Image: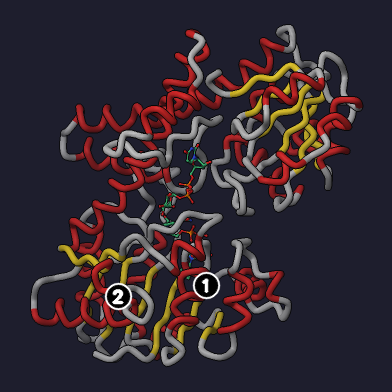
Amino acid sequence: MKITKICCIGAGYVGGPTMAVIAQKCPHIQVTVVDLNEQRIADWNDPNPENIPIYEPGLSEIVSEARGRNLFFSTDVDKAIDEAQMIFISVNTPTKTYGKGKGMAADLKYIELCARQIAKVAKQNKIVVEKSTLPVRTAEAIKSILDNTGNGVQFQILSNPEFLAEGTAVTDLLNPDRILIGGDTTPEGEEAINALIEVYSNWVSKDRILTTNVWSSELSKLTANAFLAQRISSINAMSELCEKTGANVSEVAKAIGMDSRIGSKFLKASVGFGGSCFQKDILNLVYIAKSYGLSEVADYWEQVIIMNDHQKRRFSNKIVQTLYNTVADKKIAFLGWAFKKDTNDTRESAAIYVADDLINEQARISVYDPKVSQNKMLNDLDYLETRSKQDNANYLNVFDNAYEACKDAHAVAILTEWDEFATYDWKRIYDAMHKPAFIFDGRNILDAKQLEEIGFVYNGIGS
Ligand code: NAD
Ligand code: UGA
């Protein structure tokens, strides 16, 4: 089947950038991204490409090239489904907050709604592509809904998980390590797989396109995230031991990373991993293992989350202990709120939990982040429901530059590894702070020696 029209349901961090790149690389394919969220679609259609709802380096340029040519953002979900031969499902799959599996299982209600809508609208055969991260065997449920509630048309379900990381989404999409496509081995399944291979072949070489059965593809996505997160928890576990023993975690990471069997990536000790996916996907994996009665497997992976929670708490405890066991009424400046640099995404960011702990100790938090708005920060705190919205607003103050945020602070905490933080005039910041002036570098991005020469008391992670 030759694909000329693609629809993507979900205009979020995955749907938006992924479809923008497909549209840029496949000018012969009309790509329509739809979402129920009218504001989000309006933002994607903002005449100024700088105002699109997701900040990713290089994305606004791609959107401005393809938008209106063969890339469209719309709230007319039915029309886009009806017209497309291939439909990507890229909606959110958050951790369930209710009922069976609460706090662990993936909430598949948005996926099911998509399947039902596709079934209702489709009048011709369609290829349905799972782009969202899903529990293994979800395709079975989607197929059952499509086959039993549809208009008698044929659906092929493919699993095509996305491996992009935020902050580098565009380069990851343009130059992926691999494209994974899971599908049926029937002739119709193979035809569907080939149709998707053809789309990616417009810019990805064939040797990077891997095909598997649907279940391997679904499970590989959860496995990849679990392995990546496990490396961070492993190095973070070592960071605590380094602090007790005089070893330096950056040196340890370098030493082990030079072993080609281990490799140097994802060994950066930090205040803890954040983001919308690592925790959610591992919890989901744990839930799946438990549901098959595999308690050792479940416990093994759950420890990655336990270690990450410990690391975040350990960071806030260290701030309190170092500041003479009280931070009440002290001003602690946060540099960074996003869960990593080069994104405006704050989901599960360590900053939220560290701020919450410190506000419990009645610290006053002043924050500067180059891309995150005050509204978003307050929403993140309010979502925890630890205290009233008014109290959060009283304790958290947001500034539009770091020098103001740090003025009169007792300590500075680095929560995100934004490059600009390393370029600051730290002497100026030091002069405007209470003494002794403490720095808690949750990302190990600053030059400890230089800061100590200025007069700071420097605390990194794992040294
Ligand atoms: P997101 O919350 O940013 O976007 C999802 C969008 O889907 C929202 O705008 C929502 O309004 C829309 N939506 C939900 N139900 C809908 C429906 N029935 N019809 C139309 N629109 C609907 O989520 P995201 O970060 O893009 O993640 C999407 C999926 O991709 C998740 O399964 C996630 O695990 C996976 N994933 C995310 C990343 C990442 O870096 N964020 C990377 C790889 C995979
Ligand atoms: C991660 C994966 O890297 C992607 O491959 C995957 O597609 C995505 O999850 C997903 O499924 O959503 P992302 O969460 O966007 O991507 O960003 P990462 O670069 O993986 O960083 C995650 C968190 O780990 C961040 O808080 C980051 O600061 C932290 N991290 C990362 C460390 O603390 N140390 C490291 O060495 C690397």
- Residue 150 or 242: which is nearer the viewer? 242
The mark found on residue 128 in the picture is: 2
- For mark 1, give the secondary structure: loop
Q: Residue at x 21, y 39 (%)?
A: 291
Asked whether residue 66 is in view, the answer is yes
Callout 2, which amino acid?
Val
**Which quadrant of the rendered structure holds the N terminus?**
bottom left
Query: Which picture quadrant has residue 457?
Result: top right
Residue 402: x percent and y percent?
A: 81, 40
Image quadrant in which the C terminus is located: top right
Q: CA distance from mark 1 to mark 2?
A: 16 Å
Could you tell me residue 442's position as x and y percent? 61, 29
Residue at (64% x, 24% y) in the render:
357
Q: Is residue 431 above or below residue 113?
A: above
Q: Nearer the viewer, residue 320 or 384?
A: 320
Choose the circle earlier in sequence order: 1 or 2.
1
Q: Quick check: can you spot residue 279?
A: no
Report which residue position mark 1 lands on: 35
The kind of residue tagged 1 is Asp
Where in the figure is residue 399, as x and y percent of width and height? 83, 43
Residue depicted at 52% across the width and 83% down the height? 76
